Amino acid sequence: MKFQKICVIGLGYIGLPTASTFAAHGVNVLGVDTSQHIIDTLNKGKIHIHEPGLHDELKKAIQSGNFKAATKPEEADAFIIAVPTPFQENKFGEYNGVTYKLADMRAVISATESIVPFLRKGNLVVLESTSPPLTTVDLVGPILARSGLEAGRDFHLAYSPERVLPGQIMRELIENARVIGGVTPESAQMGHDLYATFVKGQIIKTDATTAEMVKLMENTYRDVNIAIANEFSRLADKFGVDVWEAISIANLHPRVKILTPGPGVGGHCISVDPWFLVESAPELTQLIYHSRMVNDAQPHFVVNTVKRALGSLDGKRIAALGLAYKPDVDDLRESPANEVVHLLQSEGALVKAWEPFKPDANLVGITMSPTLEDAIKDADALLLLVGHTEFRRFNPMQIAGKTKARILVDTVNGWDVEAWKNAGFDIHVLGVGKVRNT
Ligand code: SAJ
């Protein structure tokens, strides 16, 4: 095997599944993370994130002796960088009066720097972190050159974006098509050979900057399409139309596939990545910018819907069901639900949040309930913010016995209106301009 030992730097939602999958396929993997807590947790065979199938894969990898975790890299045949690229907190770009967010590349920079002392001739370095165009060539390559070795001549350098869907990562890592962009065709080939260890989907070779663009285009395409669904929900509300019904009819057209409206777009990918294109070329990205604005404003539309259901929010007790950024995941990053809770509170509402995937989450300014019962008992309204399967499966009669609330606001079309109505609830669904239960 060409790749007997690899280092995976960054053991989060992407790095850890990737490291575990390589180890399960016979590669000796050193997982690297700057957090000693994460390293200790993993070396004990425990896990710090929730992803179906990951814990089992990791346990297998540890038992086989193929996986260990440490805070520093070692010499290896290949290095994979899978660290986060969030926004900068306090710095923004500006173009023609428009303010835009900027990528914080510090983790990519320090992960790359950590490889420099261990880089050897013939090695492969792959960046997986979603990054602005030209990062591989203009940022990673020059840092690695501090080793005295040149990318494309002495070692191989490639960009290969992860494209897996949280909640289905373990399956999609293996089955999805994978793009490998090399700084040279040889680098792309080496990347191909590395991922062929486990990828069953097509592996497409291209150059590094194209691969970076592909990743950003995919997530931006989704963001723009969710924005139009969210805008349709506001129009439907205005015109007394049920957006869910209208979308399902429109989608019968063979060339139309409208996505789903909701409380907004969250997570660490779709709500972040389009900004990397805006940052790179603000003069060319009006549609992308405005789609971000539409999605970021959707929590305000949720609050208006809640206000219509409850009248004034002042002093009203609201049980917010779900804080994750999407159904059946424990990831609360950039969650629109979080923003909704803050907006409701700013209008005087008393909100208790229940998140079954992270009941003990510590979020500034948000009161978490330890149980569902605690969240809903004294509520004036229940607000469904995430379509977790367990929420969708609620038995309306049972819930009616556990809460004094008789008003529901459903932002994800997750509940059967008739069933809840029969249990005595008045239900308001986001993007439904007429009250559906009349
Ligand atoms: N959402 C909607 N309506 C929809 C679909 C999603 O409001 O119709 C919302 C979700 O509730 C969530 C956000 O958008 O708040 C993003 O969710 P998602 O399921 O669309 O995507 P992510 O962020 O979990 O994963 C995306 C995926 N990209 C694409 O589908 C193009 C995944 O394949 C990528 O690997 C991942 O980003 C990533 O890591 O970049």
Image: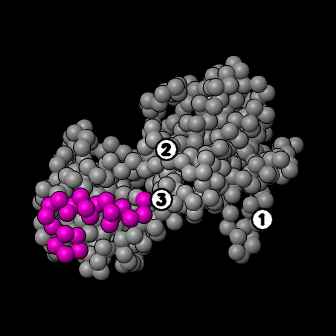
Inter-mark Cα distance, 3 to 1: 38 Å
Inter-mark Cα distance, 2 to 3: 13 Å
Q: Is residue 195 above or below residue 143?
A: below
Q: Which residue is mark 1?
A: 249
Residue at screen point 57% across, 60% down: 283
- Circle 2: element type: strand
- Circle 3: element type: helix
For residue 437, what is the image quadrant?
Answer: top right
**Kind of residue indicated by mark 1:** Ile
**What percent of the width, then of the height, locates residue 430?**
73, 45
Residue at screen point 58% across, 26% down: 352
- Circle 1: element type: helix
Q: Nearest the camera: 258 or 83?
A: 83
Q: Is residue 147 magenta?
A: yes
| Left or right of residue 383: residue 361 | left
**What percent of the width, then of the height, locates residue 68?**
17, 52
Q: Which residue is mark 2?
A: 92
Looking at marks 2 and 3 on the same chain, the residue that comes earlier in the sequence is marked by: 2
Circle on res. 280? 3
**Kind of residue indicated by mark 3:** Ser
Badge 1 crowding class, 10 Å Cα cut-off, few under 14, some 14 to 19, many 20 or more, is: few
Q: Which residues are magenta?
A: 132-154
